[in-house]
Amino acid sequence: MAITATQSKAPASVTNIAMGSYIDTGTVSATAARLYTGFKPRYVKVFNETSGDQIEWFEGMTAAYGLKKVAAGTNSEITSLGITVYNDGFLIGLDTDIRVTSEQLRWLAIG
């Protein structure tokens, strides 16, 4: 059995962590939710507190991708409507399990 592993860490002098919440109390708009952290995330997790559904994005993944887990227990890799990272934050796509009108989202970004 062969194992291939890679690991990288942030420079000792720089570690960024941001967290917050997001709720769209109107009809979910046709545009994705852009959140600003002030740094480029290397990891993002968004948790729908209302439904229990969640999505994660790891450095190296393509834009709009995500590893999604719905509360019913289904895990999947999505290739659109997921998370896109920018130099100053990230965008939560329009995945209908994660972005739902009047459902509370909590998020964590690590850079």
Image (spheres, rainbow, N blue to C red):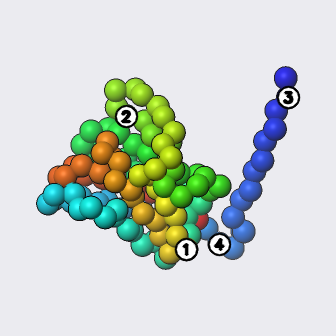
Q: Residue 2: which numbered mark, if any? A: 3
Judging by the rendered image, the residue that carries numbered circle 4 is 14
Separation of residues labelled 4 and 1 (CA atoms):
15 Å
Going from N to C along the chain, the mark reached first, 4 or 1, is: 4
Q: In the image, residue 76 lies at what x, y percent?
A: 48, 34
Amino acid at the residue labelled 2: Val
Q: Residue at x 30, y 45 (%)?
A: 96
Q: Nearer the viewer, mark 2 or mark 4?
A: 2
Residue 55 left/right relative to 103: right
Q: In the image, residue 72 lies at what x, y percent?
A: 34, 26
From the viewer's side, name the closer residue of 43 and 14.
43
Q: Residues within 10 Å of mark 2 (few under 14, many from 20)?
A: some
Q: In the image, residue 88 lies at what x, y percent?
A: 50, 75
Please identify the quarter of the rendering in which residue 19 is found: bottom left
From the viewer's side, name the closer residue of 82 and 52.
82
Q: Residue 70: which numbered mark, if any? A: 2
